[in-house]
Image (cartoon, helix red, strand yellow):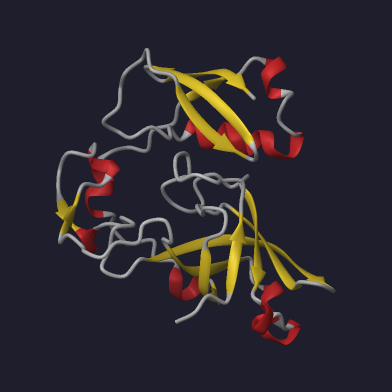
Amino acid sequence: MEAIAHVHSDFTEKFGIPRQSGLVEALQATVVFMPPYRSAEAVRGLEAFSHIWLIWQFHRALRDKWSPTVRPPRLGGNARVGVFATRSPFRPNSIGLSAVRLEGVELCPDRGPVLHIAGADLLDGTPVFDIKPYLPYADCLPQATGGFTDQRARRRLAVDCPPELLERVPPSQREALLGVLAEDPRPAYQQDETRVYGLSFAGRQVRFQVAGEQLRICSIE
């Protein structure tokens, strides 16, 4: 397989990326096709779909060996389960799958069709192998169960950001940043309330601390 496109997002580092697609709907990104695939005909009709599937590569997690078990963050990073029972990036084949909202298809004279997407859990530069429309009648399964992920309620933090710091972020990116922080980007096993964490987002370095269910932004540079 070869990459047909690449994702351009506000994440240049893995830390802080939502653990699943759709958790932070305000996150904006684009999918830009490689020259051989910059064909308006190839995406004809795609704009009629509200969501799409992206099949992509964990290009920063490539390894020569693989392990049959991994420690998912959802279980605190301590319990091991089978790799095929998780969405861990450390897999025999480093393939990822994300359902994202399609905001629009822009036809650019120099880059061909550019897909504007929202809710992506993808690193900047992620190679995309394929794109497929999301089909609600087939892909939405309300009766499905979530295995060990159902055992723990989804946890969101209250984010405290002084107005003078938030003003350092463009208005169009503020909701996305606050949403990313509310998802608690820390590894589940790190609970040190004195530690200051650093998150790279949209060309800015955001430093924060977490105490209990409260996240406080210390600086944005």
Residue at x 64%, y 25% (from the top left corner): 221
Q: Quadrant of residue 74?
A: top left
Between 175 and 197, the one nearer to me in the picture: 197
Residue at x 72%, y 83% (from the top left corner): 39
Between 23 and 68, the one nearer to me in the picture: 68
Reply above or below: 16 against 190.
below
Residue 60's x, y, as percent? 42, 56
Residue 124's x, y, as percent? 57, 54
| Residue at far front of view | 64
Residue at x 35%, y 61% (from the top left corner): 62
Between 107 and 60, the one nearer to me in the picture: 60
Reply above or below: 219 against 201.
above
Reply above or below: 78 against 159.
below
Residue 175's x, y, as percent? 65, 35
Q: In which quarter of the image is the N terminus?
A: bottom left
Residue at x 26%, y 31% (from the top left corner): 189
Q: In which quarter of the image is residue 103?
A: bottom right
Q: In which quarter of the image is residue 188?
A: top left
How many tags in the picture?
0
Residue 192's x, y, as percent? 32, 18
Please indicate whether residue 47 sits to the left or right of residue 64 in the image: right
| Residue at far right of view | 109
Reply above or below: 109 against 102.
below
